[in-house]
Amino acid sequence: MNDINRYRELASKWLNGSITEVEKEEFLTWYKAHVDEQINIPPSFAKDERALKQRILSNVQASMQSPYNGKTGKIRALKKKLRAAAAIITLAVLGAGSYYLAIQKTAEVHTSLEDVNPGKNKAFLSLNDGPVIDLQEGGQGLVIGEELHYTDGTILESELFNNVDSESSFVTLSTPRGGEYQLELSDGTRVWLNAASSIRFPRKFNKNKREVELLAGEAFFDVAAYSQDGKKVSFFVKNDEQLVEVLGTQFNINAYDKKLGIVTTVAEGSVSVKSNNKSYRYARMVLAVGMQTIVNEKGVTKYQVDPEPFLAWKEGYFYFNDANIYTVLQAFERWYDIDVNYEIVRSDDLFYGKLPKNVTLDKALYILKTAGVHFELNNGRQLTIKNKESDEK
């Protein structure tokens, strides 16, 4: 069983659902031959592709007590050809050119890079587009009520918010690169803002309408149910491309990539997504749990997805699913507040897996190094991706 191409083929068939039971047994027999003897896979394990990938990740992590543990044999042989620094099974499951992100929080990584700390809770607040208040020392989040206060109960003291009409006042909360923030609106709805994001909302909702505007970036919403005179009041999230309507649910909106479009993913309940371009035949779609829409110049497209990868940022993780190097580094740019330049023309490397967001930049960049990506970090925050050298020895 030394033909890795055969097992890439089986892995691909497993992931697209065309694999037979006989082929599953063939694949798992090969898998068992390439993991520690202590790991036992029950027969039922073959029926759960998601659990298989998680078991594989656990095995890879267990074998990587340190990224420099001197592994030999299969790993070293594959590294020359595929430039991976994980177990052989990783490449079988994900295919050539794909790498599982597996960095232990306790692993010590020694590089020549200057440490760049991960992002943290910080944001900027303004009222009616007026002067800006720096909230970076303001704890975990902000609560919008009769008085503005932080989640720990400390009142936000600012003359900007004194003696103003709550219902006619609009507040803008923005996070910089390297920042994220949490917000509770006047109706009890909670919002998580990712890095380099901005949201505009009324200081106080009126009785018959709840509407906020996602100006840029990404936000997760946990919408509070709200009624007025016995009638449920909808909650709206708008931007230039779409309008989302909900009553009480949890969902994520990602507006980072204008070329891709606005990505809305439902974690709980249901939402209605309506494109602002009336020329589309299917301009409005209803999404239930595990559904997603992408709204762009081509129209509105609906998908069935696993919500976890799209919500991982809120839980403190990067989660990449066959992401190219540009997608990975765009996430790093926002979170570590770095600038990336490319000397490479193109790259076929694909990355899959989770990485904690609380690691420093040198540890995050180690995944690129294990994949054979060459880079330089200058002046602390200027990262240059170099052309790969010829085959490693």
Image (cartoon, rainbow, N blue to C red):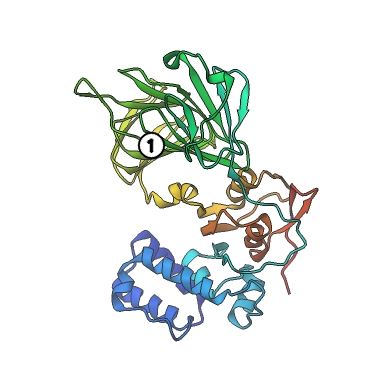
Residue 14, position in %: x, y? 37, 65
Quadrant for the C terminus, please: bottom right
Residue 373, position in %: x, y? 68, 60
Which corner quadrant of the image does residue 271 belong to? top left
Residue 377, position in %: x, y? 76, 53
Left or right of 328 in this view: 212: left
Mark 1: secondary structure: strand
Q: Residue furthest bottom?
A: 37
Residue 281, position in %: x, y? 33, 25
Left or right of 118 in this view: 223: left
Residue 337, placed above or below residue 112: above
| Residue plotted at (56% across, 53% down) | 357
Q: Nearer the viewer, residue 55 or 345?
A: 55
The amino acid on which the numbered mark 1 sits, given as a three-letter code, is Thr
Residue 337, placed above or below residue 365: above
Q: Residue furthest right?
A: 379
Q: Nearer the viewer, residue 175 or 19?
A: 175
| Residue plotted at (46% across, 51% down) | 315
- Please give the residue where the numbered disc 1 appears in the rendered image: 301
- Circle count: 1
Q: Residue furthest left?
A: 230
Which corner quadrant of the image does residue 114 belong to? bottom right
| Residue plotted at (44% across, 68% down) | 9
Q: Residues within 10 Å of mark 1 (few under 14, many from 20)?
A: some
Residue 71, placed above or below residue 287: below
Left or right of 250 in this view: 372: right
Left or right of 389 in this view: 337: left
Residue 47, placed above or below residue 327: below
